[in-house]
Each structure stands twice: as C-alpha cells, then as structure tokens.
Image (spheres, rainbow, N blue to C red):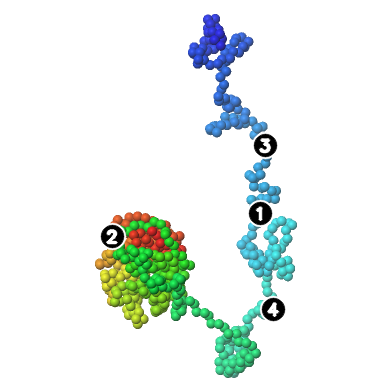
C-alpha cells in the first residue's frame, strides 16, 4: 500500500495528482487515508475508493426524465409525463371481493336485489287495506315470473281481483244491513201494542235493558222461579276488599320475637350497642360522610319520605310509592321490624309524635291515619275527600292530640284527634300546600305552597301574619328547621336553598346554597346535628353538602341511581346520614 502511495506521489505524476486528488486525500496521515483500489484503464491507472456506500440512491432514474410514476411520500410534485400506453394498460392483479358493491350478478344493493317501484300513497293504502281485510293484494314486483296476486287467490277470484275501494255492496245487501225502525203505530191507540210512537219509534233490537215494572216484574219473577228449580243458581262472589282499605288496615311484625330477654320491645333505645344515644344531640363536631355502610331493601317502588325516631334516632320510618310504610332498625341488625298496610295508593308523608309512640301517615288515597308504632295498630283515620300533602303534629307536649294537614285544595286543616273533627281551617293559599313548619316556640307556623309564596300564621288564628312573595320566587316544596331554631331553609325549585329567619321571616341574603339540580323534585333539606353542614339531595342521585358559614360546596356524594328525595342526619352520630331515593333503596352513609 505504501509503495502504491509513494508511486502516486512521485515527481513524474505530479500533474496527475493535482487533477485526480481534488480533495487532498493523498496529503492525509496514513491512519486516516481511505482504502483505495487501483484500476487500469486504457490510458492510465486510477485509484478508486472501495469504502461501501451506506445509503445508495433509491431513485435510479433522473427525476426530470422519468418514464414511470415513482414518488416518495414527501413529494408534492410529480415530474413525469406518463405515456399513453401506460395510461391505457389493463388493471392488473386479482379482483377485489369487498370493494365492489355488486358482489353477485343479480345483486344491486348491499343486502340483495332491490327493484325500484313508484306508487302513490292512495294506491298503497288501497292495496294494504285490501290485503288486511280481504286477504289478497296485487304483486308490485316487475319480475315477469312472479305471481300476479299475493295472498288468497280464491278470495281474489270471488271479488274479481278488485281492490277494497272499487268493491260495492249490492243495494239488496245494503238494505238487509240497514237498521230498521219499528212501525210508527196507530194514532188512535194510546198504550200497549201498536201504540203511536211517531218519529220517536225505537230501532229494532234496541229494547231497553232496565228493570221490569209492575205486572211484567211479577211475570218475570214466576219465570225465574221455574228456571231456578231447573238449574243451579251461580252465585257471584263479591269482590274482595283490598288490603289497606279504610277499616282493613293491618301490620306485619318481621322479627323473631317482639320482646327481648328483659321484656323490652324495639321501642327501647339500644344503649348497650350505642352508648352515644345518652349524650345530647349535636354535642360533638360532625363530618361529611363518604361511604355506604348499610342498605335497607324491601320497598318495591320509590321511597318518598323517611323519618327518624324522635330524640334517639334508633328507628327509621319510611313511606313508599308501593303503598307500604316500613319501620327499620338502625343500630342493632339493620333489618325491617314492621310493615304497615294502611294505604291504597302511594304514601306521601309520615311524621312521629313527640314521644315516637304514635305516628301519622297520609297518602294519595286521600286518607290520613294514626298508627301505634309499637303494636302496628291503626288507631284512627281521617279524611275530608282531598289529597293531603303534608301532616304535622303540634310540637307542644300538651297539644299532641292536634295535628295540621296541608291539602291539595289550598287549605291547611287542623284536626283534633280526640274528637276526630276539624277545629280550624287556614284558607289563604292559592295552590296546594306542601310544607308546614312550626317556629317561635311553636306559637307560629310557616307554610309553603305551589303558589310560590311563604305564609306565616299564628297557631289557631286563620289570618296570615307574614306574606312573602317576590316576582322572582319559585315554589318551595321542602322546608327544614335549623338545629338552632333561628332559621329555616327552603328548597327552591330554581336550584338553590334559601334561608329565612324565624323571628321576622326575612330572607338571610348572605346564606344562599346553590350548585345542585333539583328542578321538579321536592328534595328534602338536611342539617347536621351541630348545624355546621347543610345538605340536600338532587335530581341526579347525589347528596350535596355545603358549609353553613361560607356557603361553599364541600362534597358531592353519588348516593343513588335516581333522585335522592329524602335524607336525615342521625342525631347522635358524628357523620352518619340516611338517604332515600326513588330507586326504592334506603342507604346509611358514614
């Protein structure tokens, strides 16, 4: 190699080096010189590099003088004029079995063979009715081999292949079918056969089906006696009265034993299992629940209302659209204790008395009923023929025999349960009454209605003392009292919870809770026992929790698949909430 290079750089070939070695390869150090191969040509010897080329040129043709269409993915222009012969070459390669729509020779549509046929709406109706009534119709196919008639060929031949519209009944048949009047009768005859009836003559076959009178009755009675002797009389059973009808109320106890080893019923709070029931409600700080720890199933339709046992909250009462009222255990086993059958239609509201020993229920069957919580007996029933939407005991201990009911006929009715009579009517609202809330140490009560107003009343005086109505106000179908008794929160149907004070009934403008969707649903508002949190169900199945002080949403809990219509905070727990929904479930969250 060295002799080759020495020979290359000799004096005699100096001129050749300058022409061949344009890049100065010969002046490189030996280590960096490329491998060169010597080739002999006719006139001289040349050194050619034998280093392999890593990326040879793909486009062998000159792009300016191309004869076939070779393009790179990056090309934006085609520098080629394809000859006419190339453009008229036949398509090469196999036939595409998927791309062509006509996969079969007879197929002209994706699903098969379709014949185009135009027909007026009238012609189509005629053929359709002819097929439906007479059992045959003309075949619309243009295929010459297809039959001309579809359906019953015999029927078509009888009617001479005519459609329904062109068939006419002969006059003789029409006359036969026509209803005939009885003869007018003779003017001279007043009563009996052939008596004059004139244009008021009855149609034949229209004899009255009423009860016979006088002699006819006697004659018929004799005939009936004869028939009775010949045939057995089929006695029709009377329709069985429905369970829960007035006078047929019942209840079913679901436990093994009504009494425990100490002779106590489920009315006794389970202090052994839940010692916190002895403490005061709202004494400890509360937190927002996060997980479901129990589900009560048993209602077959949506649950419309839930109420916790007063003071302790160890029992839960629920009313449902399946007409049943159920009493559930909260602390021990979490099962259903008793089912009350007392309504024929959906239950709208239930409410406990102060001691919880009795409760009232009302439903869409227009009945209000008083029940014994322990024995399940229906003690009394009340009704004035209208649908009650809300029932409330008077909260005073000495007035536990009085209750108020908001009715569908815009009135609030006051009942005395001892006498069973209506003792007062509050009649000022312009729409069905939805809520009744006692305030001001139970001397007054507040009502809301579909007429989009709030009215405050003195108890037993049917005169409105405060009337709240603004043009921008919406209906407020659910109202809850704050634990401090200083405020009440109303669920407004424009997706916000508004707060009013209980002393002067002014709206607390700084307290407004929004961000949930309740339009159209009477979702109950709830307060934590210490008053720190305010909560509400919504139409999507969530429970939304706000901070009472700031009005900010703190949590949104996905609780049910349908609207969460009612929920209650357990009074002695730090974070437990019961929710009820139209999906028929009641859940306990912690």
- Reading the chain from its start, which is encountered first: label 3 or label 1? 3
- Foreground disc of the pair 3, 2: 2
Q: Is residue 49 left or right of residue 531?
A: right
Q: CA distance from mark 3 to mark 1?
A: 31 Å
- The crowding category of the residue bearing disc 4, from other C-alpha atoms within 10 Å (few below 14, some 14 to 19, many at least 20), is few
Question: Which badge, 3 or 2, comes first in the chain's sequence?
Answer: 3
**Dot 1 corresponds to which residue?**
114
Circles 4, 2 touching at the beta carbon (< 8 Å)? no
The numbered disc on residue 172 is 4
Left or right: where does residue 31 sit relative to residue 231? left
Q: Residue at x 56, y 15 (%)?
A: 36
In front: 549, or 357? 357
Mark 3 against mark 1, which lies toward the viewer? 3
Can I make out residue 276 in this image? yes
In this figure, which residue is indicated by the disc labeled 3? 92
Q: Locate the C terminus and report the quarter of the image it occupies.
A: bottom left
Task: Locate the N terminus and report the quarter of the image it occupies.
Answer: top right
Q: Which residue ends up furthest to the top in the rendered image?
A: 12
Query: Could you give the CA–CA distance between mark 4 and mark 1, rounded to whole angstroms?
Result: 46 Å
Residue under circle 2?
509
The label on residue 264 is none
Secondary structure at numbered mark 1 = loop
Quarter-of-image position of residue 51: top right
Residue drawn at (65%, 56%), measured in percent from left and top? Answer: 117
Judged by depth in the image, the label closer to the viewer, 4 or 1, is 1
Q: Is residue 482 left or right of residue 172?
A: left
- State the SS at label 3: loop
Task: Give me the C-alpha separation between circle 3 and circle 4.
Answer: 77 Å
Which one is in front in this view, the residue at disc 2 or the one at disc 1? 2
Residue drawn 31% across the image and 72% down it:
395
């Amino acid at each position: 190699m060295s002799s080759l290079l020495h020979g290359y750089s000799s004096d005699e070939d100096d001129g050749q080096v300058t022409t061949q070695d344009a890049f100065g390869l010969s002046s490189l150090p030996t280590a960096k010189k490329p491998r060169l191969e010597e080739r002999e040509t006719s006139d001289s010897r040349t050194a050619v590099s034998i280093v392999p080329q890593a990326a040879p040129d793909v486009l062998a043709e000159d792009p300016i003088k191309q004869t076939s269409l070779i393009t790179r993915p990056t090309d934006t222009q085609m520098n080629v004029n394809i000859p006419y012969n190339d453009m008229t070459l036949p398509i090469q390669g196999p036939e595409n079995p998927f791309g062509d729509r006509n996969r079969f020779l007879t197929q002209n549509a994706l699903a098969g063979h379709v014949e185009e046929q135009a027909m007026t709406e009238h012609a189509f109706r005629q053929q359709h009715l002819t097929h439906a009534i007479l059992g045959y119709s003309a075949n619309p196919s243009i295929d010459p081999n297809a039959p001309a008639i579809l359906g019953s060929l015999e029927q078509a031949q009888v009617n001479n292949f005519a459609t329904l519209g062109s068939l006419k009944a002969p006059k003789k048949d029409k006359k036969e079918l026509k209803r005939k009047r009885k003869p007018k009768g003779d003017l001279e005859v007043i009563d009996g056969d052939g008596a004059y009836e004139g244009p008021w003559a009855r149609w034949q076959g229209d004899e009255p089906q009423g009860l016979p009178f006088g002699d006819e009755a006697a004659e018929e009675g004799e005939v009936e006696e004869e028939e009775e002797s010949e045939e057995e009389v089929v006695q029709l059973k009377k329709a069985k009265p429905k369970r829960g009808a007035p006078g047929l109320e019942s209840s079913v106890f679901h436990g093994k034993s009504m009494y425990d080893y100490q002779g106590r019923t489920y009315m006794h709070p389970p202090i052994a299992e839940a010692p916190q029931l002895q403490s005061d409600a709202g004494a400890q700080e509360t937190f927002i629940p996060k997980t479901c720890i129990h589900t009560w199933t048993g209602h077959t339709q949506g649950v419309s209302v839930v109420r916790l046992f007063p003071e302790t909250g160890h029992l839960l009462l629920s009313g449902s659209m399946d007409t049943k009222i159920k009493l559930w255990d909260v602390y021990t086993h979490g099962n259903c204790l008793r089912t009350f059958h007392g309504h024929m239609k959906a239950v709208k509201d239930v409410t406990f008395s102060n001691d919880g020993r009795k409760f009232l229920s009302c439903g869409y069957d227009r009945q209000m009923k008083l029940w014994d919580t322990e024995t399940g007996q229906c003690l009394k029933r009340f009704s004035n023929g209208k649908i009650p939407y809300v029932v409330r005991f008077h909260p005073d201990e000495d007035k536990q025999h009085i209750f108020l009911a908001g009715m569908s006929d815009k009135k609030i009715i006051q009942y005395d349960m001892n006498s069973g009579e209506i003792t007062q009517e509050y009649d000022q609202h312009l729409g069905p009454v939805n809520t009744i809330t006692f305030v001001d140490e139970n001397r007054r009560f507040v009502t809301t209605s579909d007429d989009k107003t709030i009215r405050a009343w003195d108890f037993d005086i049917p005169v409105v003392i405060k009337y709240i109505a603004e043009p921008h106000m919406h209906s407020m179908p659910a109202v809850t009292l704050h634990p401090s008794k200083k405020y009440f929160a109303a669920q407004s149907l424009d997706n916000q919870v508004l707060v009013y004070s209980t002393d002067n009934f002014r709206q607390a403008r700084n307290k407004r809770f929004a961000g949930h969707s309740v339009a159209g649903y009477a979702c109950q508002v709830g307060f934590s026992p210490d008053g720190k949190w305010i909560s509400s169900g919504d139409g999507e199945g969530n429970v939304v929790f706000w901070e009472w002080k700031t009005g900010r949403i703190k949590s949104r809990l996905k609780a049910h698949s349908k609207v969460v219509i009612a929920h209650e905070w357990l009074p002695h727990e730090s974070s437990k909430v019961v929710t009820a929904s139209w999906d028929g479930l009641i859940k306990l969250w912690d």
